[in-house]
Image: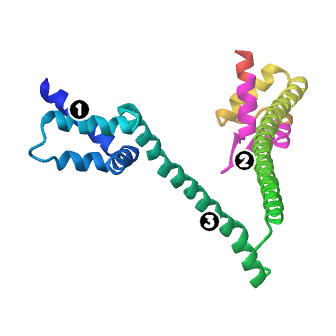
Amino acid sequence: MFKKIFESCEDSIVKRVSNPYFGTYIAVLLIDNWELIYTLFTFSSYETRDTRISIIADYISREGGLSWLFAKCALIAFIPFIIYYILLNASGYISNWFELRLKPWLLKQVDKGLVVDKVEYDKLASRITTLQTKVDDERKKRMEAEDERDTLSREIKKLSTDNIISNENKDTTASIHSFGSKYQKTLDYFLKRYNEPEFSKFITQIRGFMEISNRPLYNDALLYGLIEIQGGKVAFTDFGNNLVNQFVDFNN
């Protein structure tokens, strides 16, 4: 516990001693009261304690009291700081004036194009900023337009694909209807011209490779592509088989 208290006091003393004002104050106090300091270290051995106290008290009284002695030194210690900051700011002002005023003027005298007037520079900088803003806006608009174009391209491509599929479906449906219509028309023709029993008998004779009894029906079947001759034998074509299957399914 005492160690912590001692360390805390030590840190406080070190901070105060390292303070520039405190050091200045001690220096002023020693210099301004050098007589008192000198007297304290040069008392004669024959002088009594009361005599020494009297000498110190007379000195303090002559200086206006102990409070004024310390207060006067404190005020005097402020003077170097005031002078220091005045000189610091004055030197900064002179340095900035030289760098910002005199040096550019001298350089301009040497080379007219080396130094640009601040007003002109600000105008150019403002114009550059404005142009850069316009460029950024144009770039943003271009990117938005490109994104919109890509989106439209994708939508157009999708619509084209959908239309192609739709057209293919329509064509397929139309083909199916057309194909079915062709079957129906052909079948209606044969059933109107020849009755169902006769047409059924014809189917049985073709599939059984039997002799055809109805020659007109045979000739019509060849004409409409229902049958064909393969290797000396009569057989149904694909169209004929499909039509016959449809007829058989309908009758069943």
Marks 1/2 in contact by CB < 8 Å: the verdict is no
Magenta stretch contains residue 3: no
Q: What amino acid is labelled 1 in the image?
A: Cys
Q: Residues within 10 Å of mark 3 (few under 14, many from 20)?
A: few
Residue with the mark numbered 2 = 229
Give, as a single range, the part of the protein colored magenta: 218-247
Q: Nearer the viewer, residue 125 or 235?
A: 125
**What SS does tag 1 mark?**
helix
**Front-most of 220 and 8?**
8
Q: Position of residue 153 (x, y in %)?
A: 78, 46
The residue nearer to you, when weighing 252 against 206, is 252
Mark 1 vs 3, N-terminal side: 1
The quarter of the rendered structure image containing the N terminus is: top left
Q: Which residue is mark 1?
A: 9
Of callouts 2 and 3, which one flags the residue occurring earlier in the amino acid sequence? Answer: 3
Q: Secondary structure at mark 3?
A: helix
Please say if 55 is above or below 124: above
Q: Mark 1 to mark 2: distance in Å?
A: 128 Å
Q: Residue at x 78, y 40 (%)?
A: 155
Position above or below: 80 against 247: below
Quadrant for the C terminus, please.
top right
On the image, the x and y values in percent for residue 85 come to 54, 52
Q: Residue at x 16, y 46 (%)?
A: 43
Residue 231's x, y, as percent? 66, 51
Q: Tell me which residue sits at (71%, 72%) in the image.
A: 102
Are there few (<14), some (14-19), or many (20+) residues within 10 Å of tag 2? few
Callout 1 environment at 10 Å: few (<14), some (14 to 19), or many (20+)?
few
